[in-house]
Image (tube, grey):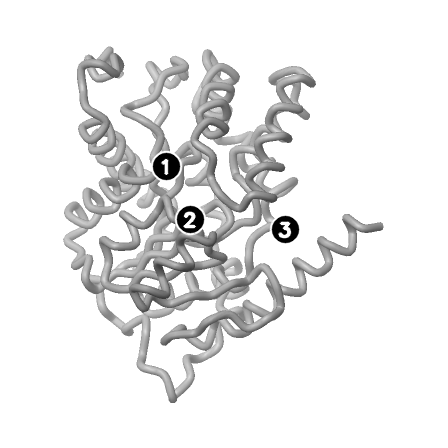
């Protein structure tokens, strides 16, 4: 990738950098989605289908079967998966001697903050991004993709929220495409999307030259407004009607993305998003406990997932207390 002028922050406004990051992520996602389709395994799809029973007859049909102008966009951290993908990836790289103990301690602190505070702290995200870029600089993209497959099995697979996974499967069963949208590197997000049987992923794009990471980003991290720009760019390229699309997130930082679609969902919401969702009459679902969360026109498939998600949370809490 040729050197680009946007790498100097002073030359572009934050809005322009967000658009650039979104467009770059959408382009990368479209390229990888075809590969994901070719690599999809029937056994994985059959397993996912078991998590998504039929929608209740008392509820309006959603997702709409056969609506090829609709798609679903899912945030990753704490929406699809417990915790931060970048932290789990960091653990895997540490195990493989990519960096030292003091770096792992910093990753652990950032993850602890994320889990306890339930919000994304910009300073911690900046530190995590800079650490990750310095770690992968000079490594081949193909190498990190291969390692990502292993790390998914080691640290991420057991942290997928069954309820959110069932929602994603409901869209797939309706014939719609489903995309992850995350600030995590697009390579990690693509691995996770493939393993979940999803269409593809929008993620932060790290610059590479001849397949080797340079330690720089294309634009900025796919966070906040940049996510909305990525979804907008992808929807345009895929000829989607955003008014018929759905988006799912836990964070108020994703309100721009959620506001972009006709069917926004607050999943495991932080306090600000929960308040905003209630004020806007958005659908709410919380899989962090076994208690019933607010339910407004949510597919029945999520009900089973809520119980499974609550059980997983209870088991995790029990283990921490032992």
Distance CA(mark 3)–CA(mark 2): 22 Å
**Looking at the rendered structure, which numbered label has been put on residue 251?**
2
Q: Residue at x 78, y 51 (%)?
A: 319
Mark closer to the chain start, 1 or 3 = 3
- Left or right of 252, for residue 77: right
CB within 8 Å, label 3 to label 2: no
Residue with the mark numbered 3: 158
Q: Nearer the N terminus, badge 3 or badge 2?
A: 3
Under circle 1, the secondary element is: strand
| Rendered image: mark on residue 203 | 1
Q: Are marks 1 and 2 in contact (CB under 8 Å)?
A: no
Q: Quadrant of residue 202?
A: top left
Q: Secondary structure at mark 2?
A: loop
Q: Nearer the viewer, mark 3 or mark 2?
A: 2
Q: How many marks?
A: 3
- As rendered, which of 13 and 4 lies closer to the eye? 13
Looking at this view, is 154 or 56 the one in front?
56
Which class describes the residues within 10 Å of circle 3: few (<14), some (14-19), or many (20+)?
few
- Farthest-out residue, right: 322
Residue 274 screen position, x and y as percent:
42, 59
Residue 231 in the image: x percent, y percent? 25, 46
**Relative to 133, is 22 on the left or the right?**
left
């Amino acid at each position: 990738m040729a050197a680009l002028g946007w790498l100097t922050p002073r030359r572009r406004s934050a809005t322009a950098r967000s658009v650039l990051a979104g467009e770059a992520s959408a382009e990368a996602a479209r390229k990888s989605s075809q590969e994901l389709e070719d690599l999809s395994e029937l056994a994985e799809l059959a397993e996912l289908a078991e998590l998504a029973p039929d929608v209740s007859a008392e509820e309006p049909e959603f997702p709409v079967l056969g609506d090829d102008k609709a798609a679903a966009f899912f945030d990753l951290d704490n929406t699809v998966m417990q915790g931060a993908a970048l932290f789990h990836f960091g653990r895997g790289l540490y195990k493989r001697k990519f960096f030292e103990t003091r770096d792992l301690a910093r990753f652990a602190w950032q993850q602890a903050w994320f889990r306890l505070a339930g919000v994304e702290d910009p300073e911690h995200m900046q530190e995590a991004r800079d650490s990750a870029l310095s770690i992968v600089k000079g490594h081949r993209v193909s190498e990190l993709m291969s390692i990502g497959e292993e790390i998914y099995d080691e640290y991420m697979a057991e942290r997928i929220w069954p309820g959110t996974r069932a929602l994603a499967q409901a869209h797939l069963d309706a014939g719609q495409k489903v995309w992850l949208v995350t600030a995590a590197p697009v390579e990690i997000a693509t691995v996770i999307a493939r393993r979940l049987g999803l269409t593809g992923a929008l993620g932060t794009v790290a610059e590479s030259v001849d397949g080797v990471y340079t330690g720089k980003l294309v634009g900025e991290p796919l966070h906040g407004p940049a996510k909305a720009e990525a979804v907008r760019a992808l929807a345009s390229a895929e000829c989607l009607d955003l008014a018929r699309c759905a988006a799912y997130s836990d964070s108020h930082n994703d309100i721009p993305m959620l506001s972009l679609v006709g069917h926004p969902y607050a999943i495991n919401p932080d306090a600000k998003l929960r308040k905003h969702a209630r004020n806007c009459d958005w659908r709410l679902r919380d899989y962090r406990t076994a208690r019933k969360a607010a339910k407004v026109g949510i597919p029945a498939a999520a009900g089973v997932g809520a119980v499974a998600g609550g059980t997983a949370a209870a088991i995790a809490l029990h283990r921490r207390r032992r």
